[in-house]
Image (cartoon, grey):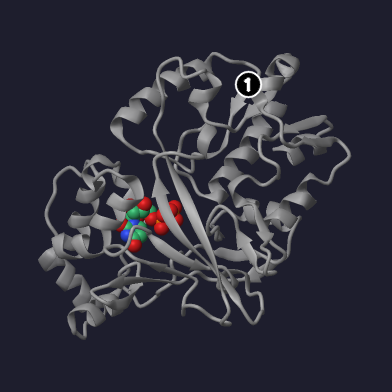
Amino acid sequence: MARGLAEAGKKVLIVERRKHIGGNCYDEYDEHGILIHRYGPHIFHTNHREVWDFLSRFTEWRPYEHRVRACVDGKMLPFPINPDTLNLLYGLSLDADQMEEYLASVKEKIDTVTNSRDSVISRVGTDLYEKFFKNYTLKQWGIPAEQLHPSVCERIPIRLNRDDRYFNDTYQGMPLHGYTKLFENMLSHEDITVELNTDYANVSGVIESQHVVYTGPIDEYFHHCFGRLGYRSLRFEFKHVSTASFQEYAVINYPNDYDYTRITEYKKLTGQHADSTTISYEYPYDEGDPYYPMPTQANALLYEKYSRETGKMKKVFFAGRLGAYRYMNMDIACLEAMNLVRDILK
Ligand code: UDP
């Protein structure tokens, strides 16, 4: 938004509480010289050409298509579930058509899908739900899938073909020199000033006469006047390993074992060549920086109250995952930001 507004002739001040730009997309070289994502794996993918084109002004791309394995019953299985997953798991030899028949025989008929458990068992039945989704979801969110909006597990498709990519978007890639570099290039404009280590709460009085785009937690902006929205946080345990490769895939999910949900090996995302490698174990937490809005019904109702307040405001706009209180991917955050720039300029 800063770039879009600056290019339209506005002067922009970015107020950032952290000591760096880029939010949770921030990446940096660790003390071993390995490029890591400080706030967990960020993989870029989009079907929106205008988002891809906009970001491509600030970075070249490393062609990268994300592939994940899930460790289930001691086997490393393709995830999202595809015919190979079922064949390896159950010792079958289904082709795509037979997989469809198989799923038809195990999936449960649910007239109205109201939660994430329903959304999975209505597609693949109970056994696959229990092996791949039930415990991962409980670990990730701290509450059972029954209490989460269907859209959470619907992020994961069920594939009737052997395409084992995590995403099948038209545009996929990793910024060639990293996300931080991308954002540095984006913010390199004479009318953009960045104030790091500055809490918006401390300067809001100074800038309240200006137009404000607030990207922090929306309930914090309103001093939690209607109550606190729920957020889920993560803790990353980084480990440097002195072998060139730690695991076969960039991300391996552990739905049923351990307290962490997944292990990421960053070199496999970034394509960096080095004799050693850095991995992270991802532990979901209640406390800490907010990463995810919690898609429960109670939070949706509470958010509505805050949202009604924002509708009354003429000069303050809310954007991003925390401002919009929506579990959106990077490309959608970017698309909505581009649209909001247009709206503000109008
Ligand atoms: N999920 C799961 N098992 C997995 C991976 C994902 O049950 O092996 C569920 C889980 O509820 C998770 C959601 O699907 O929160 C979305 O997964 P995604 O990989 O999109 O999560 P993100 O990368 O955004 O954390």
Q: Quadrant of residue 260?
A: bottom left
Q: Residues within 10 Å of mark 1 (few under 14, many from 20)?
A: some
Residue shown at 35%/69% (left/top)? 79
Q: For the residue labelled by badge 1, is the local secondary structure a helix, a strand or a loop?
A: strand
Image position of 248 with respect to 337: above or below:
below
Give percent across and percent down for residue 174. Answer: 62, 65
180 left or right, relative to 193:
left
Image check: 212 left or right of 260?
right
Asked if residue 136 shows in the view, the reply is yes
The residue carrying mark 1 is 316
Q: Is residue 195 above or below residue 223?
A: below
Q: Residue at x 47, y 75 (%)?
A: 249
Q: Position of residue 224 (x, y in %)?
A: 46, 19
**Residue 157 visible in the shown view:** no
User: Residue 186 in the image: x percent, y percent?
Assistant: 76, 48
Q: Quadrant of the N terminus?
A: top right
**Image quadrant in which you'd find residue 122:** bottom left
Q: Position of residue 71 (x, y in %)?
A: 32, 72
Q: Nearer the viewer, residue 158 or 134?
A: 134
In the displayed structure, does residue 125 sit left or right of residue 23?
A: left
Up-down: is 329 above or below 201?
Answer: below
Q: Quadrant of ligand 1?
A: bottom left
Q: Quadrant of the image for the C terminus?
A: top right
Q: What residue type is disc 1 on?
A: Val
Residue lying furthest right: 190
Q: Is mark 1 within 8 Å of ligand 1?
A: no
Looking at this view, is 88 or 345 the one in front? 88
